Amino acid sequence: MPYTAKTFTITPGADLSPVQLELHLGLYAGYVKNLNLLNHQLTLLKSDRSTNTLAISELTRRLGFEFNGMRLHELYFEQLSGNGEISGPLATALATQWGSIETWKEDFEQTCLFRGIGWGILSIDVESGQFYNSWVSDHEIGHLAGLPIILAVDMWEHAYLIDYKPSQKTDYLKAIFARLNWSTLDSRLAN
Ligand SMILES: [Fe+2]
């Protein structure tokens, strides 16, 4: 079954302008389209594996970029429907592991501010119960195997460049945190 681009409840504002959001949602739709195209092409190519070995290999390697490009953007947009109020079981658990929610937030923000394009990710190791703040380059490089993602912040320049200069990444992060819906994050943790 082909994937369909989802819709999200985000009200544009001075912090995330209509133009910025429209551009970004358009890019997201592009990942959905390309993933469908990729899956379709792979199905066709696999009807003759011996002839298409190299093409199958190259396109399969591309799945991580297109699929994660789709899924990470869905996690990103879905979590921006709140008012930034930090509360709930996740906040409590993060404060327990890091000593305080402020210490966790500082570490997460510093992770997001790494140079290069990619994502700041909060995930949990279900086996140990330990949370991780980590960095994913592009959409697919550096994921911690099997760890469910609880928070994903897009740090590609296309996510903020219309509203913020590259030197204002901290202001962009502030805007994202001010829109975070911690109930959404809690439901990811519960799942
Ligand atoms: Fe993006």
Image (spheres, helix red, strand yellow):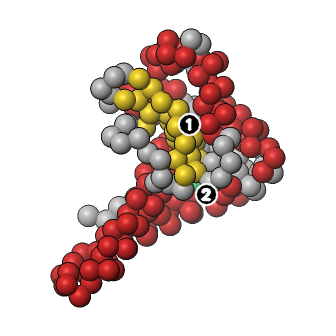
Seen from the viewer's position, the closer of residues 110 and 68 is 110
For the point 43% across and 38% down, the residue is 149
Q: Is residue 122 left or right of residue 124?
A: right
> Would you say residue 53 is visible in this rendering?
yes
Q: Residue at x 32, y 73 (%)?
A: 57
Q: Is residue 14 left or right of residue 109?
A: right
Hey, what amino acid is under mark 2?
Answer: His
Q: Amino acid at mark 1?
A: Ser
- Residue 137 x, y percent position in the rendering: 55, 52
Q: Secondary structure at mark 1?
A: loop
Question: Is ligand 1 less than 8 Å from the beta carbon at label 2?
Answer: yes
Q: Which residue is mark 2?
A: 24
Which residue, given by chain and number where applicable, does mark 1 sit on?
81
Front position in the image: 10 or 47: 47
Pointer 1 or 2: first along the chain: 2
Numbered circle sitting on residue 2: none
Image coords of residue 91 (percent x, y): 52, 18
Asked where in the image residue 179 lies, by quadrant, the reply is top right
Image coordinates for residue 174, horizontal then vertical, percent: 71, 34
| Residue occupying the point 61% across, 57% down | 24
Instruction: Say above or below: 34 vs 69.
Output: below
